[in-house]
Image (spheres, rainbow, N blue to C red):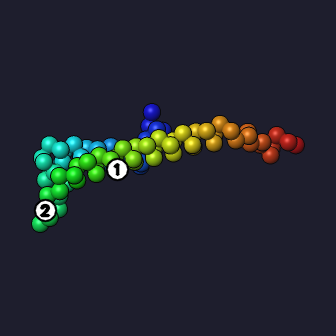
Amino acid sequence: MLRYLNMFILIGICLIGVSIAGFATGSKFVTEPGQPINPLSSFVYFGVGILMLLNGYVTIRLSHSSQQKSPPKEDPQTKE
């Protein structure tokens, strides 16, 4: 199960968590001090989190498909 966790997946989960906190606080959680509150900030964080999860999924799928298609390596000691 841990082989399916990469940094894209972990960052995506964190960004979705931040967006949920932003939705709960009316976008005050995702706003820097001194900035005006942007009501769309939580949606941006949520969209980027979904994009990161998708990127992580594609990366995992491509790495597993390339491992399955590679020919088996020959051991130089068994050729003797």
Seen at 74% across and 40% down, the residue is: 71
Which residue lies at the image location 34% right of the left edge and 50% below the top edge? 48
Left or right of 77 on screen, residue 5: left
**Considering the numbered disc 2 on the image, is that residue within a helix, a strand or a loop?**
loop
| Amino acid bearing label 1 | Val
Residue 35 appearing in the image = yes
**Local SS, label 1:** helix
Residue 69, given in percent of the width and then of the height, sits at 68, 39
- Which quarter of the rendering shows the N terminus? top left
Residue reaching furthest to the bottom: 34
- Residue for badge 1: 48
Dot 1 surroundings within 10 Å: few (below 14), some, or many (20 or more)?
Answer: some
C-alpha separation, residue under disc 2 versus residue under disc 1: 21 Å
Residue 6 visible in image: no
Residue 49 is situated, as x and y percent measured from the top left of the image, at 34, 47
Position of 37 with respect to 48 (left or right) is left
The quarter of the displayed image where residue 74 is located: top right
Q: Amino acid at mark 2?
A: Pro
Q: Residue at x 85, y 42 (%)?
A: 79
Residue at mark 2: 36
Q: Mark 2 or mark 1: which comes first in sequence? A: 2
Callout 2 crowding tier (Cα within 10 Å): few <14, some 14–19, many ≥20: few
* Residue at 13 percent of width and 48 percent of height: 26
Is residue 21 toward the left or the right of residue 5 in the image?
left
